[in-house]
Amino acid sequence: MLLSSIQPLSRLPFEILSEISARLDKKSLKSFRLACVDPAVSAATGAPLFDTVALRLGTLDWSLGRAKSQPLDLIDLNCANAVKILVIDTRHPYVVHEELCDKRYRRFMDKNYEFRNQMDPSDERIYESKIPEWEFEAFLELVESFVEAAENLQTIHWRTSREVTEEFHTQMASLLCGWAAVTGCRLGITLSLRESRSMATGVELYLQNLSNLHHFYIESSNGEEDGIYFPKGFDRVLIDVITRSPNLKSFGLDYSLYWLTDERHGYQLHGALDTFSGMEQRANEYPFESLKLKAHWNIIEGTNWGAMRNLKSLNSKWCIGNGFRENDLTHSHLDKVYASGHMSRLDRFVTNVYTLSTHRFLQRPDLSLTELRLTLNNIDIENSRLAKQFWQEAFPKCALTLLRFKVHNVPRPIPGVIIGNITSMHAWNWLDERDNDAKIALRYGSKIQELSIAFCRGTDSFITELIEDLVYEGSSLRVLNMVFEIGKDLGERLDVTEAKLESWRSTDEVFHGRSFVIRYKRRLVEKRSIAWVRKWRQFPARAAEGFEPLVWFDYILQSWKLSSDKDGVSQLVRQNDEFCFDDKLKLN
């Protein structure tokens, strides 16, 4: 758009400018703001453009003496008042080199790259040197200046790790926790730990200064299957944090799934969880709403689940024994969690275990979920029977209120077995077959806006058939997240799926003007020990012109967007890859 044609927009009423700004994405908002330098346009674009601001270490902006940041300009432009959410990311306080950014980007974009968690020598360079002390100080000063200028700030999410110095952590914790105490601003802290099957000694030093938290999560950055083994007495330190945070609403912990062969380890956190439950009873105006827990099933014993009556979100990943079956986790254990009257206000439910207890729980008449996520890891015949029961009995009941739904069966690898060929695991998949349970059941989910499901059998992909079936059934689906089973033929499934997405065309009017996107998410996992090899496969890269590669990010998002041309032909158009961060204060 020419500058001469955009200037008259500044003469529009502020209400109309605000409405226009609300409908633009951030890239368009920035272009609009730069092309039309006017106080009214600046004010109208400021609120949606600067609603959320992120300050990060581990970028070129904070390396080798080049400390600079866009938020500094925001303060100068008096735009900080528009900011409601501030994300502070100090997980990676390392010097970043441009050539390393380019090299890692090219390697991440190689779909045939074999990722070893014994990192390549080039990867070790990302841990070579931390930023100098004066840049830690400059970053701290920036955060302090920003929170003072952002008068309408409502939420701060600090994501950090033990990679930062204890002194820096203490100073940042003092600043943010003190600010939350004075202003009532919601403060969430996520502490990432890289320990994998080893003791996280010294972690208590990073907890002793935390207080006035609304959200608190200790996560493992080593992936879904790893967790953290905390030292003896850690539960007392955790209880102290909870006690100093009377307004705590959500709590998450990635406890080790491997070291808990002795039941005594499982009881280390009971005191902390019971303290959490008890505080919820004493402070009804700040009810405990969210719990994310990765732990061995024996932690269920002795925990007062009945006290968590106001729980709205439960994300549980239970270790289910040393084998590939649920041989240790019995119905009686989960019945204690899902007992009648427990969690009747639950809105969001995530689990990795589907048993008869889970099945009965999902059919409770007092349960109205808007989000359900089943990330399973079973391949036995019983799993196949439960899948059929789920689709025929539990899902139709849940579908009455569901807006977001994910089901993904990811079996543990078995030596000598090609998992993609096991028939029972396909019981959870959508297949283009007349008697497929998922295909029949999903037609009940007319309210579902976001769906994640597998759609392959062997190397056959039914991605476009899935899209057409749901659209023709009049669903509200807006986002389809593609998931795939692991296995040697994963690359072939991706290739077949990509070819079908690229070649799909339709002239049916049902697709015209419809907002619909297909996504594939690949998460970055940090592993610095234990040599094993796994395939990291993805679709071919597509980068935006002028894209600046990153060393640190949380996941890559590849997507196709539904589009119709002037001749009425609809197709799926590949979008540029996005390197994204988990900035939302949500216990996923």
Image (cartoon, rainbow, N blue to C red):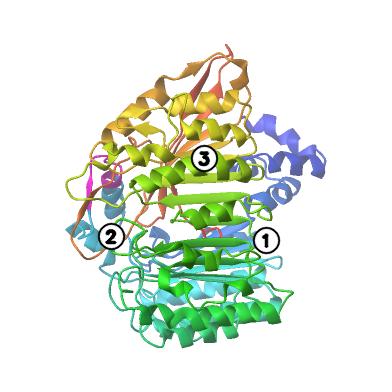
Q: Give the range drawn in magenta.
A: 106-115
Q: What secondary structure is found at the residue carrying circle 3?
A: helix
The span from disc 2 to disc 1 (Cα, nearest Å) is 34 Å
Q: Which of marks 2 and 3 is nearer the N terminus?
A: 2
In-front residue for pair 276/2: 276
Residue type at tag 1: Arg
Residue type at tag 3: Trp
State the residue lying farthest toward the top.
Answer: 567
Q: Nearer the viewer, mark 2 or mark 1?
A: 2
Q: Which of marks 2 and 1 is nearer the N terminus?
A: 2
Say which residue label 2 marks: 323
Q: Which of marks 3 and 1 is in front?
A: 3
Q: Which residue is drawn at 63% across and 51% down?
A: 369
Q: Which residue is drawn at 30% across and 30% down?
A: 459
The span from disc 2 to disc 3 (Cα, nearest Å) is 26 Å
Circle 1 crowding by C-alpha within 10 Å: few under 14, some 14–19, many from 20: some
Q: What secondary structure is found at the residue carrying circle 2?
A: loop
Q: Is residue 188 above or below residue 361?
A: below
Left or right, 555 with respect to 249, comes to left
Q: What secondary structure is found at the residue carrying circle 1?
A: loop
Residue type at tag 2: Gly
**Residue 125: x percent and y percent?**
24, 62
